[in-house]
Amino acid sequence: MPLYDYQCPTNGTQIEIHHSMATTISTWGKLCELSKHPLGDTPADTPVEKIMGAGNPFKPEAAPDFKKDRKPFRGIMMAPMRTNKF
């Protein structure tokens, strides 16, 4: 089963839970019931948001352009760039 991340905007709690793709979780009460998390002071009918792509909470760095920027690779042995001149 896939792993999903949900966040409650009311209390700011983020919960990871495994469930089938057919299962729909839209309220704090249902999320707490399935994840066995305590309900707390938040009402059970409070809506929750599914966080998409939460596997990495940090913004990834842009991949270097190998043709334009060779500077990070100067100390590494590399094959020379291919050209049309043989």
Image (spheres, helix red, strand yellow):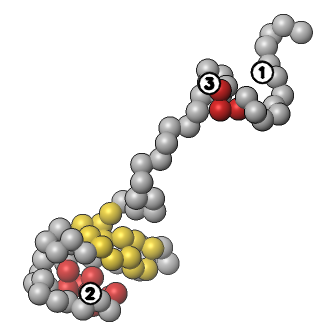
Residue wearing tag 1: 81
Neighbor class of circle 2 (other Cα within 10 Å; few <14, some 14-19, many 20+) is some
User: Residue 62: x and y, percent?
Assistant: 50, 38
Q: Tell me which label, 1 or 2, sits earlier in the chain.
A: 2
Residue wearing tag 3: 69
**Residue furthest top in the image:** 85
At label 2, the amino acid type is Cys
Depth check, front residue: 29 or 85: 85
Q: Using the image, determine if residue 30 lies above or below residue 55.
A: below
Residue 30 visible in rendering: yes
User: Residue 52: x and y, percent?
Assistant: 36, 60
Tell me whether circle 3 and circle 1 mark residues in contact (CB < 8 Å). Answer: no
Please give left or right for residue 64 compared with residue 24 in the image: right
Q: Determine which of the numbered discs, if any, sits on residue 5 in the image.
A: none
Residue wearing tag 2: 32
Neighbor class of circle 3 (other Cα within 10 Å; few <14, some 14-19, many 20+) is few
Alpha carbons under labels 3 and 1: distance apart: 12 Å
Alpha carbons under labels 1 and 2: distance apart: 56 Å
At label 3, the amino acid type is Asp
Depth check, front residue: 53 or 79: 79
Location of residue 33 (image quadrant): bottom left
The residue depicted at 78 percent of the width and 35 percent of the height is: 76
Q: Using the image, determine if residue 35 lies above or below residue 83.
A: below
Local SS, label 1: loop
Q: Tell me which label, 3 or 2, sits earlier in the chain.
A: 2
Q: Using the image, determine if residue 45 lies above or below residue 68.
A: below
User: Residue 21: x and y, percent?
Assistant: 41, 73
Neighbor class of circle 1 (other Cα within 10 Å; few <14, some 14-19, many 20+) is few
Which of discs 1 and 2 lies nearer the camera? The answer is 1
